[in-house]
Image (cartoon, rainbow, N blue to C red):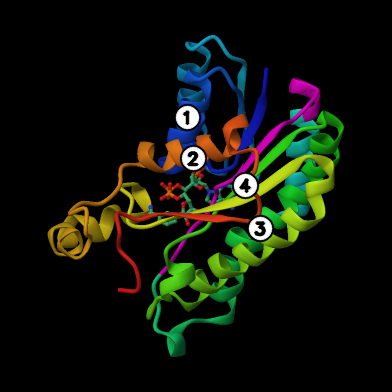
Amino acid sequence: MKYALITGASRGIGRATALLFAKRGINVAVNYLNSEEKAQKVVDEAVRYGVRAFSVRADVSSEEDVKRMISQVEKEFGTLHILVNNAGLSSHYNPEELSLDEWNRVIAVNLTGPFLVTRYAIPLLKKAGWGRIINVSSLRAFSGSAKGAHYSSAKAGLIGLTRSLALYLSKFNINVNAVAPGYTRTDMTAGYLKTKEHEISARIPLGRVAEPEEVAEVIYFLASEESSYITGEVITVNGGIYFT
Ligand SMILES: NC(=O)c1ccc[n+]([C@@H]2O[C@H](COP(=O)([O-])OP(=O)(O)OC[C@H]3O[C@@H](n4cnc5c(N)ncnc54)[C@H](OP(=O)(O)O)[C@@H]3O)[C@@H](O)[C@H]2O)c1
């Protein structure tokens, strides 16, 4: 029986991942920041699959919150096998309008967050003797983003973190990989999909944006026994879109 912590699991890709894990028999800790009710709904839905689940509020960019979250996981589950660093946010500014505060905020959640959560989860993963860490990067790590230098930089940095952790953790039987989704239908993209979905879909070889469940399937694969010989890798899930 496996135990997982998924950050940012109240909505979007994290929610879809938590529910898929639960459906496939993995116990899930559902992290959120603000959406307490939504996180509780994910927990309620997860337990219907017969697994254990609980929600835990923590800002992944706060060291104190992260320490408390990992302690709570230890208290509730006693162990941890799978960590999905999914929590993230983005904003859109031209580089010369991007304030240092905004740069720092986006780097803190998307890059420092995965570092912090991993750092404090490592002892539990090591103790379990088998582990998987999956970091949710982005197409933007590769393509860049004219109005998202902070976001692209954080997501590209996350790939460096993934490879570094993979090197260090391989001797502990812990594989570390990333997924890099393209356009996925979540709250994060709802605003521009409302007006631009047709235009965006036309640029994607598969002709449509992804549903969060399609990204969750790849995360699940990387969390499973079946991905045993993959570490330090990035799997893009983008319908064939590259460098646009
Ligand atoms: N959607 C896309 O097209 C796309 C493409 C590439 C990569 N991604 C990446 O995929 C991941 C999930 O994105 P999404 O589209 O599913 O986003 P979303 O629907 O906006 O959900 C974001 C999730 O992250 C949580 N969160 C935000 N800041 C947090 C913090 N400081 N601490 C803890 N939790 C926090 C939110 O919690 P609350 O609900 O409590 O606010 C929510 O559960 C992100 O890392 C994103 O960058 C998304």
- Numbered circles on residues, count: 4
Circles 4 and 1: CB atoms closer than 8 Å: no
Task: Name the mark on residue 230.
Answer: 4
Q: Amino acid at mark 2?
A: Gly
Disc 2 C-beta below 8 A from ligand 1: yes
Mark toward the start of the polypeptide (1 vs 3)? 1
Residue at 30%, 63% in the rendered image = 241
Mark-to-mark CA distance, 4 and 3: 12 Å
Which label belongs to residue 37? 1
Mark 1 Cα shell of 10 Å, populated few (<14), some (14-19), many (≥20)? few
Q: What is the quadrant of the N terminus in the image? A: top right
Disc 2 residue crowd, few under 14, some 14–19, many 20+, Cα 10 Å: many
Does the magenta segment cover residue 75? yes
Measured in 3D between alpha carbons, the distance from the residue under mark 1 to the one under mark 2, in whole angstroms, is: 15 Å
- Quadrant of image for the C terminus: bottom left
Residue 81 location in percent, x, y?
A: 71, 31
C-alpha distance separating marks 4 and 2: 22 Å
Q: Which residue is mark 3?
A: 162
User: Which contiguous range is marked in magenta?
Assistant: 74-91
Crowd around label 3: few <14 · some 14–19 · many ≥20 (10 Å) = many
Q: Amino acid at mark 3?
A: Thr
Residue 14: give its label.
2
Residue 139 placement (x, y as % from top left): 42, 63
Q: Quadrant of residue 11?
A: top left
Please state which amino acid type lies under the numbered disc 1: Glu
> Which one is in front, 165 or 104?
165
Residue 169 against residue 150 in the figure, above or below: above
Q: Is residue 230 above or below residue 29?
A: below
Q: Report the mark closest to the observer, 2 or 3.
A: 3
